[in-house]
Image (cartoon, rainbow, N blue to C red):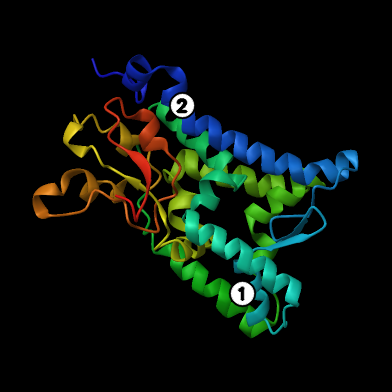
Amino acid sequence: MRLPVGARATQVNGFFNAHKYLILRRISQLTILMLFMLGPLAGVWIIKGNLSASLFLETIPMSDPFVLLQSFVAGHIPETTALIGAAIVTLVYFGLGGRVFCSWVCPVNVITDLAHWLRRKLKIRTSTKLSPNIRWYLLLLSLVMPLITGTIIWEQVNPVSLLHRGLIFTMGLGWFLVAAIFMFDFLLVERGWCGHICPMGAFYNALGKKSIVRVDASSRDKCDKCMDCFAVCPEPQILKGPLFGADKGQSSLIDTGDCTNCGRCIDVCSEKVFEIKNRFTR
């Protein structure tokens, strides 16, 4: 009988090593959220603002480059502080891999991960097929609409911004949008929101295509083809070449902006095939 996904890794490597990146990701997401909440709740202003624009320790500005780009297209000339903040965030995500935002920062990731976990537990295998290109079309639309309307349209409905602001202040109708995303991923499309719809994910995908930090299937010769990594990866199509393309001369480096550097593949691999590396020191 086939063991549940990740069970073999837990047996061989121990519970912590088989869940290390999951634990670290949740600590990262919770810590970032708590730093934002300390001000409104306790008057300790380590970070002021939200994920769109904030100030760290009253000194370092941080601005979401995607929001800033939409604002610029809408005809608003950004202030110097906003430009500096966007440059800082851009450099960080360019280095770490743009979609590291999706797995290590984004609060919606917790919702979509829960939906995926329940699908596995309940053995729901049906999933409507959607093109992953939809997110690119929505990214284009989110930049065209401000040009036409002079308004940052996407930020009015962006569940990432709504959930983050709602958790800090008040949720309101944001709960309905979050519930809709959960049900969409749970019942209709596996990894639907992050993998097919979210234009923020597409933007950070483009930003991190040539990032320094990468997951590498450096020990792919040890792979026993259990396919657990494919079961947990938010973008499983990116694993095939690095894992099985040695005979075709394909690199073991997962060199694509689709990768979120989440570490799920590292956690569930009992053979320790994967590791996070610097693309220049392979």
Residue at 26 percent of width and 42 percent of height: 218
Q: Residue 241 at what x, y percent from top left?
A: 21, 50
Please tell me in which quadrant of the rendered image residue 111 appears. top right
Gap between marks 1 and 2 measured at Cα: 36 Å
Viewer-nearest residue: 138 or 32: 32
Query: Relative to 282, is 234 on the left or the right?
Result: right
Is any part of residue 152 visible from this angle? no
Q: Residue 48 at what x, y percent from top left?
A: 81, 54
Residue at 33 percent of width and 51 percent of height: 281
Q: Is residue 178 above or below residue 227?
A: below
Give the crowd class for mark 2: few <14, some 14-19, many >=20 residues within 10 Å: some
Query: Relative to 262, is 80 on the left or the right?
Result: right
What residue would you read off at disc 2?
19
Residue at 30 percent of width and 38 percent of height: 230
What residue would you read off at disc 1?
69
Query: Relative to 167, is 116 on the left or the right?
Result: left
Viewer-nearest residue: 8 or 176: 8
Q: Is mark 1 on a helix, strand or loop?
A: helix
Amino acid bearing label 2? His
